[in-house]
Amino acid sequence: MEINHREVTMSDQKVPVKHYHYLKSTFPDFIDAVENLGATARQAGPLDQKTTELIQLGVAAATGSTGSVHSHARRALAAGADRQEIEHALLLLVSIIGFPKVAAALAWVQEDFD
């Protein structure tokens, strides 16, 4: 749930970013704990940042979380993933989560590429 400065200053801020700021200002200790848990989990093993973001992107797509799909797609890009890797990571999910969810996630990340 960690938000980097790049996401916050994007000219086309998404509602999830605004909502994140609301949560952060309303429940600062709780959001700090969530962010620390995420950072600790990422640092607990050998996977690099790009791989962890692609995994989290897949889970976000599986749960249908639009904001998380956008966030993890942008983070994956920042970590060195290219468009083809992000789209492939989502396509790999079709036999697990179904075409409609994959198509929706691909449409959401398309907005980040445009």
Image (cartoon, helix red, strand yellow):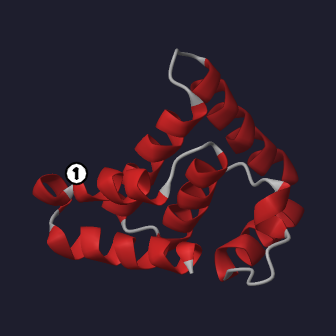
In the rendered view, tell whether residue 96 sits above or below residue 105.
Answer: above
- Along the line of sight, which residue is nearer the eye, 70 or 27? 70
Q: Quadrant of residue 50?
A: top right
The amino acid type of the residue labelled 1 equals: Leu
| Residue at image coords 39%, 79% | 107
Answer with left or right where residue 13 lies relative to residue 81. right
* Count of marks placed on residues: 1
| Residue at image coords 10%, 55% | 95
Helix, strand or loop for disc 1: loop
* Percent coordinates x, y for residue 42 in the rendering: 59, 28
* Percent coordinates x, y for residue 13 in the rendering: 75, 80
Name the image quarter holding the C terminus. bottom right
Neighbor class of circle 1 (other Cα within 10 Å; few <14, some 14-19, many 20+) is: few
Check disc 1 and report the residue beneath it.
92
| Residue at image coords 89%, 64% | 25
Q: Quadrant of residue 14?
A: bottom right
